[in-house]
Amino acid sequence: MKVFVNYDDARWEKYNIDFQRIASAAGPRRKDAEVSITLVDDAMIHALNLQYRGMDKPTNVLSFELGDDLLLGDIYISLDTVSREAAALGISVEEHTAHMVVHGMLHLQGYDHIEDSDASVMESREVKILKSLGVRNPYAEKGGMTRLRALARCGLLAILGTAAALGFAPFHLWPVTILAFGAAYWILTRDGAVSWWRRLLRAAPFGAAYSIAMFWWSLHSIYVVPELAREFAIWTVPGVLGLGLAGALVFSVPFAAASAVGACARPFMFAGLGAAVLWAREWMFTGFPWNPIANIFINITPVANSMALYGALGLTFATMGIIAASVEILRDKKRAMCWISGLVFVLIVVGGAVFGVHNAAISDVAKSGPVIRIVQPATSQDQKMSYSRDDAVARAERNVRNLLALGAGGDVRPDLIVYPETTYPFVITDDDMPFSKILNTDVILGATSYRNGRLYNSMILADAAGRVVHTYDKAHLVPFGEYGPLGVMPSPTNLAKGEGAEIISVNNGDGFSFAPAICYEIIFSDSLIPNGAQPDAIINITNDTWFGKTPGTYQHLDMVRRYAIEAGVPVVRANYSGISAFVSPDGHIESMIPIGHASVLDGRVAGAHMTPYRRIGRDWWMVLILLSASIGAIAASRRRD
């Protein structure tokens, strides 16, 4: 039999494969029979698969039967998919290619595997032919050894997912996150042409472990107050499982999608969907965009300040692209397009860093304007709780005296005093606020307010005359903490939501204005400042007492720093038990009060400016990123090395 071999992808030439011998063993016993074998990459076989089979993905082998006894047809084999599958199976490329040639030859002779009975006949024939060639049965390892390897891979991916969380506060081991993502990408993009759900399932251990390692601290709140622990501790295990399930679904998507395309297109697919996942986390369900990968660089000023240009979305896109391109280059240093892909992402980071230097420079200006005092009471949540009316009143009065004493301290007279979320122990029902009158200055404090039969988590601005002049109600409530999702899930409170972003002016003669943010509202990118507005600062009041010294408290501060950079606006952050801080528009912590310290902190703010990220907006940046990823993936798929 005549076998014509076409090396469409030159990488095939390094393998010592006797295509004549393999095809002849599987073909008809006729010397005048002919077959063509074309050796390609994923891009080519992906295009053929889409054109002739309507399947938008690469595969290992394609056969095109001519229906002639002599001219049997054409076989196409992709090196990218064969290599991945061979690595996953623990066999050589040569051995797996032999199987693909035999498989393709049998298709040309009318064998099929659509029905189980036909598949059994075809597989039996393949095994017999491969045995004659000295190649082991490719279907033999469906038992224990394969399961053992699968379990080992799951364990390794779970370890990598856990390690990937170490790049965030308080550890800031950003190289570990890069390496962990790179190793997981290496493993998960070797799986070959399998179904979408199977690819997602294979990536699930990484996503689940990554999610639990990043967010476990959120369950710490259950145990802060013994009485609440007795009621809600039963939800701990379901909570951990929920975190793992959500992470398995969300963080597995970029890996699963990347493994479905060709090698050089993968970095663009991986990076584009990585950014898309972060964008979806801004609004999906209740939203929780905590710890974007961009935040691992928060202490590297030029790189972190690139977020003023293209936000955490852009820095996440570039970071994940560099990770994927680096792996593809390590796999095959001869693929020029993979080098080009890597260079594209490096240039995005370098360009962003150059802008970041500029953003840091314009953020570093002389401080002016009103003197702002942050008060951190550092009262434990247990001390604030009470279970009898008399005890509640006594504790509330004692807290007020303590708050007044702290606010009146310090070396200078402040123009504005900022107290944290849930500071004021009484419900606000009218415009009377003797608290600020006693301090004889403008005061911002967190309190529960009651209007129209509903309770709100509010930020109250009261003037020196003792009047409430403005009330801002929290618009983005915490599920399970401030309301019960779906009306049936557990929550200790059920608050009403406010109307959202606004600018508040303080009548102290300095023309000071600020955007209010209560608690984790500040983690939602491009959400606090109305379009076109330019406040002097963002004032963020919060209560992280529930999370103590867990990573969540430190990560919350890094999310504040991220928002300051993206918005180009300094942040005044008052936290009940810590960490309170003045954060400049370049994300630098100007001054702070550590966790657990009852103290005050005086400071001024400056440097507010409009950033390109805020001018263009989060959603339009996402459009630009997806457009760039699509163009890059298409260009990489069409280029032939």
Image: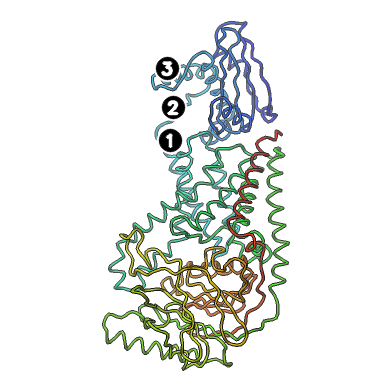
**Disc 3 element:** helix
Q: Is residue 614 above or below residue 450?
A: above
Judged left or right of residue 484, residue 341 is right
Q: According to the image, label 1 marks what residue?
A: 145
Q: Amino acid at mark 2?
A: Ala
Q: Quadrant of the C terminus?
A: top right
**Disc 2 element:** loop
Q: Position of residue 187 (x, y in %)?
A: 54, 43
The residues tagged by marks 2 and 1 sit, at their Cα atoms, a distance apart of 10 Å
Q: Position of residue 156 (x, y in %)?
A: 48, 48
The residues tagged by marks 3 and 1 sit, at their Cα atoms, a distance apart of 25 Å
Disc 2 or 1, which lies upstream in sequence?
Answer: 2
Judged left or right of residue 427, residue 184 is right
Q: Amino acid at mark 3?
A: Val
Find residue 186 and report its image quarter.
top right
Q: Quadrant of the N terminus?
A: top right
Judged left or right of residue 313, residue 151 is left
For residue 121, the mark is 3
Q: Is residue 398 above or below residue 325?
A: below
Q: Residue at 48% x, 26% y: name it.
A: 138
Q: Residue at 36% x, 60% y: name it.
A: 485
The residue lying toward the viewer, choosing from 142 and 165, is 165
Q: Residue at 67% x, 71% y: name it.
A: 609
Disc 2 or 3, which lies upstream in sequence?
Answer: 3
Contact? badges 2 and 1 (CB < 8 Å): no
The residues tagged by marks 2 and 3 sit, at their Cα atoms, a distance apart of 15 Å
Count residues near mark 3 (Cα–Cα under 10 Å), then give few for <14, some for 14-19, many for 20+: few
Q: Position of residue 546 (x, y in %)?
A: 41, 72
Count residues near mark 2 (Cα–Cα under 10 Å), then give few for <14, some for 14-19, many for 20+: few
For this orientation, the residue located farthest to the front is: 452
For residue 140, the mark is 2
